[in-house]
Image (cartoon, rainbow, N blue to C red):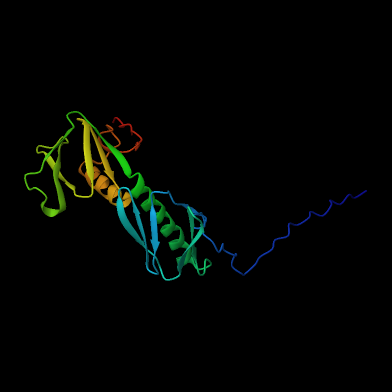
């Protein structure tokens, strides 16, 4: 008696030539923004002015953006066409800039830097050039293993403190400017992966590599 195997069911595959439907909103951009009582918001067609206890700043707005005040202490940013990629990207970016500006004008931003290495030291001293080139009259005097010292003038919008010979604390109301100055200091001694030496920003860590012996 000949027994024939049962036919194997074929998996049906469906193909579609149409592009997948993209979201017409930004996850970050659609989130409401809380406004503290100590902050004053003044929107215009091209920018939004933000003033608080620590100062005042403004964030530019694109022509397709609009601010809606849902409640006394809450506002929301919207765009005309969230389905467009550029508007959707700028939606989330601008919302983040406004939120950071509010935090900067009320609390400010702080980031620590750590000098890791034998003989690495830093001191805060008066800048002999004074406030020329946009400085605040102070500079960082760092010893980073070179044959010479490294001097970094502190910008006028940055506040620098040296609580210990191997730690720098930077403060600013602008998160972007604070990050740029911290990155500038880090460039003088980037963390290296063999001995773990360098200038570390915040909770930055690196993976130590093992040296292969011949």
On the image, which quarter does residue 128 sit in? top left
Q: In the image, is residue 54 above or below residue 65? A: above
Q: In the image, is residue 124 above or below residue 85? A: above
Query: Toward the viewer: 194 or 135?
Result: 135
Q: In the image, is residue 213 above or below residue 16? A: above
In x, y percent, where is residue 72?
A: 49, 55
Give the side of residue 101 with respect to residue 70, left or right.
left
Give the side of residue 66 with respect to residue 112, left or right.
right
In x, y percent, where is residue 145?
A: 15, 34
Marker count (numbered)? 0
In x, y percent, where is residue 61?
A: 39, 65
Q: Residue at x 35, y 44 (%)?
A: 107
On the image, which quarter does residue 58 sit in? bottom left
Give the side of residue 42 with respect to residue 1, left or right.
left
In x, y percent, where is residue 117?
A: 22, 31
Query: Toward the viewer: 19 or 113?
Result: 113
Q: Residue at x 33, y 31 (%)?
A: 210
> In which quadrant will I find the C terminus?
top left
Q: Residue at x 27, y 50 (%)?
A: 180
On the image, which quarter does residue 63 sit in? bottom left
Point out the residue furthest to the left here: 128
Point out the residue furthest to the right here: 1
Query: Toward the viewer: 103 or 9?
Result: 103
């Amino acid at each position: 008696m000949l027994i024939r195997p049962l036919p194997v069911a074929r998996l049906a595959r469906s193909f579609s030539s149409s592009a997948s439907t993209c979201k017409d909103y930004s996850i970050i951009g659609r989130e409401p923004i809380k406004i503290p009582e100590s902050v004053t918001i003044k929107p215009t067609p091209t920018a939004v002015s933000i003033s608080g206890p620590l100062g005042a700043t403004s964030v530019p707005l694109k022509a397709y953006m609009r601010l809606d005040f849902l409640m006394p202490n809450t506002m929301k940013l919207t765009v005309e066409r969230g389905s467009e990629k550029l508007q959707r990207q700028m939606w989330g970016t601008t919302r983040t800039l406004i939120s950071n500006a509010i935090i900067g004008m009320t609390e400010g931003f702080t980031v620590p830097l750590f000098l890791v290495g034998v003989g690495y030291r830093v001191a805060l001293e008066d800048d002999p050039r004074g406030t020329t080139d946009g400085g605040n009259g102070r500079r960082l005097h760092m010893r980073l293993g070179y044959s010479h010292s490294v001097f970094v003038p502190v910008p006028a919008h940055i506040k620098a403190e040296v609580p210990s010979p191997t730690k720098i604390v930077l403060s600013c109301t602008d998160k972007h400017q604070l990050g740029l100055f911290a990155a500038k200091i880090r460039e003088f001694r980037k963390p290296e992966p063999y001995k773990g030496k360098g200038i570390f920003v915040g909770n930055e860590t690196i993976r130590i590599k093992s040296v292969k012996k011949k």
